[in-house]
Image (tube, rainbow, N blue to C red):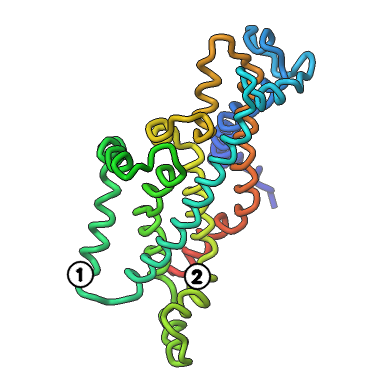
Amino acid sequence: MEIQPRRFNWSGALIWAVLIFTLIFTVMPLVFMITSSLMERNQILRMPFSWIPETFRYQNYMKALEGNDGSWIFPRNIFNSLFVSITVAITTVLIASITGYGIAKFKFRGRNLVFMMIMATMMIPFEAIMIPLYMVATSLRMQDSYAGLIIPFLVSAFGVFQMRQYLTTFPTEYLDASRVDGLGEFGIFWKIVFPNCTPVIATLGILSFRGQWDNLLWPLLVTQSEKMKTIPLYISKFAEEKLTDEGAMMAAAVLASLPMFMMFAALSKYFIGGSAVYESRKG
């Protein structure tokens, strides 16, 4: 019997080529940032660019912490970003999960209308409400404070949508059995529903944290003093200095990226598996 030669899988090779190209395209800026943070300024600006530092300049990280003006305001700005991002992530998860649970599992008049009104707010760009929101914050004297940075972002329409979609597939039989056992509605949510929403909670928490960690526009409006500014404002100011040290600026970017990498590493196993859980419930 003649053995047929194995045909080359062109479709598989194309998929792998696209994936490898996407990986390189995605990782290259990160590699550039990390290697540049260890280079001298002259080597960073030299063309063609050398990806390996001639001398490892660890002083760039000290300069990033110190700042161009030697104020050492970087740790305070890091704390501000962490405090604001963590607070917003926690409140967004709690409020969105409670609201999404109510819309998904309770039948009441106007439920669909309420949900559609919440979804309609997602269609309004932040730039359209930025000035009115700033005027409200000013009238309430929330300028240059943590309240001004946090309160406008306590609730997320996208978070409500995400939690509602996930909880729609949650088995109602578990809830009915809990009610028969005498568990109250809050107890059902806190002991039954919330612990079983880990994938979507992790996803929403990471997205909320990242949204505030990268937020530049609103802190630029609502903060005035250096001690209340967040890390995007620090990096922006660092880049605008006339005598900017590019190596120190890249070092500041690396330090500012570490919390996001750490959070992703800690929660990735939950939201990566979340899509499989969601699809299995849909099926």
Q: Amino acid at mark 2?
A: Phe
Q: In the rendering, at what x and y percent does residue 23 appear?
A: 59, 34
Q: Residues within 10 Å of mark 2 (few under 14, many from 20)?
A: some
107 with respect to 258 (left or right): left
Above or below, 25 relative to 55: below
Q: Badges 2 and 1: C-beta atoms under 8 Å apart? A: no
Q: Amino acid at mark 1?
A: Gly
**Which one is in front, 254 or 138?**
138
199 with respect to 258 (left or right): left
Q: In the rendering, at what x and y percent does residue 216 appear?
A: 44, 33
Q: Quadrant of residue 132?
A: top left
Q: Which mark is residue 7?
A: none
Q: Which mark is residue 194?
A: 2
- Cα separation between marks 2 and 1: 25 Å
The answer to whether any part of residue 63 appears in the image is: yes
**Which one is in front, 187 or 220?**
220
The answer to whether any part of residue 32 appears in the image is: no
Q: Residues within 10 Å of mark 1 (few under 14, many from 20)?
A: few
Q: Which mark is residue 110?
A: 1
Q: In the rendering, at what x and y percent does residue 50 appear?
A: 69, 14
Q: Quadrant of residue 62?
A: top right
Element type at mark 1: loop
Element type at mark 2: helix
x 50%, y 66%: residue? 197
Quadrant where the image shows the C terminus: bottom left
**Which one is in front, 42 or 174?**
42
Above or below, 233 relative to 198: above
Residue at the outermost right position = 55
Above or below, 82 relative to 180: above
Above or below, 62 relative to 40: below
x 43%, y 88%: residue? 179
x 41%, y 70%: residue? 169
